[in-house]
Image (spheres, helix red, strand yellow):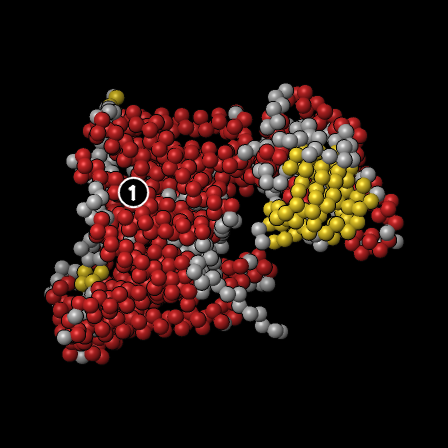
Amino acid sequence: MITESIFFLFVLDLLAFFSIYSILNLSLNVQYGFTGVPNFGLVFCVAGGAFTVGFLSTRLAAWIFSIDISGLNIIDDNLIIVSKINAVIASQPFYGILLLIVVLVFAAVVGAMLGTLFSLPAVRLREDYLGITFLAFGEILNVIGIAYRDLVGGPPGVNVPDVWAWASGWRFAASTLTIVFIAALIFAYSEYLIRTPFGRVLRAVRDNEVAAAAFGKDVARYRLAAIIIGSMIASITGALYALYSACVTPTFVRFHWTFLPWLMVLLGGVGNNLGVVMGTAVFYTIYKLIIYYKFALAGVVPFDVVWLNYILIGIAVILVLIFRPQGLIPEKPKKMEQT
Amino acid sequence: MILLVELVTLREAITYSCILSFLAVGITLLYKTTKVPNFAHAALATLGAYVTYSLTSLLGINPYLSLPVSFLIGGLVALCLFFLVLEPMRRAKASVTMLMIATLAFDIVASGAINAYADYLQTTFKISARNVSLIRMDFQIASLPGVFLTSITLIAMTVILLYLLLNRTYLGISLRASMENQILAETIGINTTFTLMLSWFIAGGLAGLGGTLLPVWTQIDTGVGMVFIASMFCASTLGGLGEIYGAFLGGFLLGFAELLGTVILSKTLGTWVIPYRPVIPLIILSVTLLVSPRGLAGILVRRRSK
Amino acid sequence: MLEVYSLNSGYGKLHILYDVQLNCKEREIVAILGPNGSGKTTLLNSIFGIADVFSGSIKLDGQELTGLSPHKIAKMGIGYAMQLQGIFADLTVEENLKIAAKMVGITNFDEATSTIFGFFPDLKKFLGRKASTLSGGERQMLTLSISLIRKPKFFLLDEPTGGLSPLYSSNIIRSIAEINKEFGLSIVLVEQNVRKALEIAHRVYLLVSGRINFEGTPSELAAQKDLMKLYLGMGE
């Protein structure tokens, strides 16, 4: 059966992750590419979205679907509760979709709040202070996730309801399709945003803060707006990732959720949405190849080959920065309107 | 209400503050010199920690003997970052954000390399390299741990030597001149590439020194530096990102706030607060940036000009 | 003698100077005049290796300067008083002077400064103070002194009267003329204050939009009423 074909599943998984990363990279593009805000703490909002799913989805589902969970502990009896919820979703696709939309909305709201929280201290300051603030905050959610067991079950994490349980054999096809669809929506939104007057001000803020301020634009407010929009998108990324994996663990590392997005955005060409998506595709292919071939090295080197990932990718970024900082597809200067 | 803090806690706070200060002063020095926050700085401390651990475990020598080696290696690696990565980018007029990403990338490479090295130690030399410590190898004087005495001695020496270097030597004055106005310094004949390299070497070396103290004070792992990232930037910002001596002040203030704060809070609110310790530097960083972005030094400057 | 041949220079992709040709002989004061943005500072920056030289040649007493790094050029007997931030604000006045002197091997500070203090006696009072505490005119004196203490043969000056009151401006201009007479320093002077510059210059170049438009003596330039009006804003 095609749905059981390993290759088919592999392609679906590839597509799903490509879409998830595309969404995250678009978030970074809105913040850095459009507005010049160096968000080195993307992981903060990604984890925020995922934790929202981890914390709320079970509770929400139980409440909305009127499932009796009295006497059960949300964390300790997590598996039991989730399987009850999945049983309901399996028979009622509408519930699955409803739950999906509701948690995504919550995740977006949480993303906006987190975005406000960690940018407020530095939003009036220069890029270096912003960078420091973002980076420092990025480290914190894992700490809280591990320490506060009721959030996402501590280090082992929790399972979350499978909103695509109704698709049974075609679960992965359904989930991938949903994610690709959402990615397309967000791409369309970004393209739209950049063409609005708001988008033009963002670019003005990026290119020449002083001039933008002289025109009466409150630079800090626009930055904040860009950060909030970006954070909402990043949070959705985390939520989708959690829903796709049907589980949440407090292991959101800077490398995967902050650093790699930067690499992909730089590769594709900053400020250019299409370029960002292409950069994601190019990078992801290379990344998969590296993972595939490094196993060839597994026996040869006296250390775990996963570290080669870090070393090679870090060097790759440095080389891109030194030799081709404008990326594969540099931003085309937008035509000026005739007044 | 008088909160009795045990002397042991005070001692630990001081040791932690010293290590933090070694890292923070490097951040400040490099920011003053190159106008870039160095996100790879913590990796230099991890490097120092593993240099010490390796030398001690493999050669059986006293951990403190590796201080000069850590300094040297920390300095050299920092030089690599400056000379091989940042200088070419600065010459191409790269933006601050690009430079920050470069330091992030270097941090990733360094982490990978340190982890690979730890694996190598384990497989080739059959010694454990993760979650290890050298506390048992520390000496004691009058029931005070050697790491406490060494760290305060080293900090005091660093402050004094740094002051003498920067204010009483021509090299130091040319360093300060390069830091402030690189182009003007060139026009009076200062080879600023050299002076910048020197400041990177010193900053990296100090991070290495801080790293040496780590395995003798606590358990280390390949990610030990990472734990310090938020704190060291917070300490540096608190003192003022451009004020070298402010880094020591910031290091001690934050070190005390973190350690003593956690102990006091755990006594009053319960031990559950302990894993939330990393929130403290974040709060202090946020408050500092909201109230006085130039740190405490900024407040002093404002008062003086009134 | 300082010679500039067919200089094309700028910054990165920005091409600012086009085929600039000029020279400054021994003991001469050469003034470079022109409207804002014409590239006067770029010219001085090019000589000192701070701007990017695309083509052309700059020779100091026969030695080629293009391609050398600024700190090497600085040790060839040429000084540069920059327009903005010509001092190290964080250092004390004494440190400012000492480090400038030390870089050319002068270690007898008292001897070196005696001449400086002859010209700018006020500086003696400020030795221990941080340069940031100095007023505009005092900073200008310090800027000049930093270059002078190095005993250069050639002296590049970028708008030394910039932002100064008329009194201070006159003083500075007078000092420059005296320095030229007393020490035989050759001076390339970029100035916005046309009248003052014409008072002391031996020869004048007019730089407009990156090209040399005129070369001659001050009186020859003053006679060209249209040039004076068009580019230098000097009416009848």
Q: Tell me if C90 is positioned left or right of A28 in this view.
A: right
Answer above or below: position of C169 versus A51: above
Picture quarter with the N terminus of chain C: top right
Rendered image quadrant of residue C111: top right
Q: Position of residue B82 (x, y in %)?
A: 44, 40
Kind of residue indicated by mark 1: Ala
* Res. C193 in view: no
* Res. B173 in view: yes
Answer above or below: position of A178 versus B270: below
Q: Chain of mark 1?
A: B
Answer above or below: position of B261 versus C106: below
Taking depth in this image into account, of B153 and A39 the one nearest to the observer is A39
Q: Position of residue C59 (x, y in %)?
A: 68, 37
Q: Tell me if C232 is positioned left or right of B282 in this view.
A: right
Q: Residue at x 13, y 71 (%)?
A: A84
What crowding class fits label 1: few (fewer than 14 Cα within 10 Å), some (14-19), or many (20 or more)? some
Q: Residue at x 18, y 34 (%)?
A: B125
Q: Residue at x 75, y 50 (%)?
A: C212
Q: Secondary structure at mark 1?
A: helix
Taking depth in this image into account, of B116 and A154 the one nearest to the observer is B116
Q: Position of residue A195 (x, y in %)?
A: 49, 71
Judging by the rendered image, the residue that carries numbered circle 1 is B113
